[in-house]
Image (tube, rainbow, N blue to C red):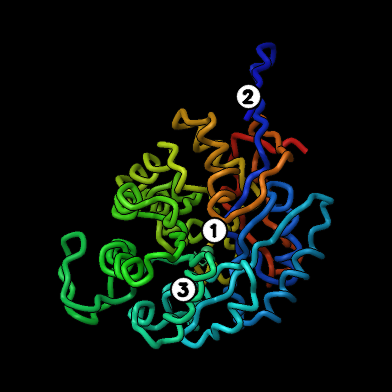
Amino acid sequence: MKITIDTSTNSRTIELKKPVCTHQHVRTEATLELVVPMIARRFRAAIIMPNLKPPVTTFTHLEQYKEIIHRANTTGHLFTPMMTLYLTDNLNPGEVDLCGHHAVKYYPRGLTTNSADGVENPQALWSKGSKPHQVLRLLASTGKVLILHAADGFAREGVIVRGTQYHADEELDPYDQEPHFMRETLPRIIDAHPELKIEVAHLSTKEGAEFMQKNGGKRLGCSITCHHLLNDRRDVMRGGFRPHLDWRPVIQPKDNTQALQELCFSGHPFVWLGMDSAPHPRKVKEAACCATGVLTAHAGIELYAEAFETFGALDQRFENFASNNAANFYGLADTDTTITLVNKPWKVRGSYLSGNPDEEIIPYRLGEEVLWRLVE
Ligand code: DOR
Ligand code: ZN
């Protein structure tokens, strides 16, 4: 990574190896055509989430989806979509086998967008004979990665989480879902599949950060989003509930954001970039039951540069986090391609796809400034 300072204009330019994003929702149709060029400009590769309707559970669907993404990359930039299959209670291990090196994504049923087909009870992940258990064994034996949406919806037995007592089968508070998973579920998955490579996606809590500090390594890594680094719960609730800052996992209180920042800026090789850019039409965000997820891909790498700069970590740690760590974990080839960022603020001016009220998307930070800019 190279930082150049122009003292006459006081502008700084960073040139870094083209990054990798481990978490993108590109959806389909007009949204896909909007988002794919955004990410192809900023990332050399990105992991594409499979929570479509219906979810991506077969080799044929995965290949078709990959082809559509390739066609939507009109930028002229080389871009590799890293495809994923969606783990259901019935996902056929044969399909996983066919899908070569691609990863599998675990969704806890009912806890996020299009998760109705997710695994009903995480116990299936360590119960011999279940389909999910077979899939995890196959992933472990072939060196493929299980990506986890690390949340539990229910306490499996009586338990105290962050001071709250839950009885068996009781629904967990959304703020307690990841802490419960990190304590009660992830250790069981690791015990049952010690060879399995696992990525905890969008780590969001201090309990998650502590677990990673202790256990992160060659087989266990995590991604962190820019919104979990740049926001805490006060931003989501300021003046009223803000649907365009609502994700799952939820943005937590300040001490959690601080724990994530500390983990992220310590320079661990098992921590990397994964945006969880998750566009939804405005009309389903501004609704009685707001869909979770927000578009961030329009400022994908710029927002991370801002976070790293704010915390004095805009140095080699930034390039490792953005471009090297996930590439090493997922076995991607190194690259000579670079991108350039400059510290010239710009304003996120308008919504996207605004010509069609069914499709219009409100981006993260609408009307506000982003401090870094991609030089094209
Ligand atoms: O906020 C979220 N939105 N979290 C997820 O896990 C899924 C995503 C989506 O697909 O919209
Ligand atoms: Zn996601």
Residue tagged by mark 1? 276
Q: CA distance from mark 3 to mark 1?
A: 14 Å
Mark 2 beta carbon near ligand 2 (under 8 Å): no
Q: Amino acid at mark 2?
A: Ile
> Is 68 located above or below residue 373 in the figure?
below
Q: Nearer the viewer, residue 227 or 63?
A: 63
Q: Is residue 253 left or right of residue 160?
A: right
User: Measuring 49% from the left and 79% from the top, which residue is drawn there?
Assistant: 135
Front-most of residues 280 and 144: 144
**Which of the numbered marks, if any, corresponds to residue 107?**
3
Which of the two residues, 224 or 213, is positioned nearer the viewer here?
Answer: 213
Which comes before the other along the chain, label 2 or label 1? 2
Quarter holding the N terminus is top right
Which of the two labelled residues, at mark 3 and mark 1, occupies the earlier sequence position?
Answer: 3
Residue 305: quadrant of the picture: top right
User: Mark 3 vs ligand 1: CB under 8 Å?
Assistant: yes
- Image quadrant in which the C terminus is located: top right
Q: Is residue 8 above or below residue 360?
A: above
Disc number lying in front (2 or 1): 2
3 or 2: tag closer to the N-terminus: 2
Percent x, y of residue 251? 40, 55
The residue positioned 45% from the left and 75% from the top of the image is 137
For the residues labelled 2 and 1, the Cα–Cα distance comes to 27 Å
Q: Ligand 2 near label 1 (Cβ, under 8 Å)?
A: yes
What amino acid is labelled 3 in the image?
Answer: Tyr
- The amino acid type, in three-letter code, at marker 1 is Asp
- Residue at (72, 75) in percent of width and height: 63
The residue under label 2 is: 3
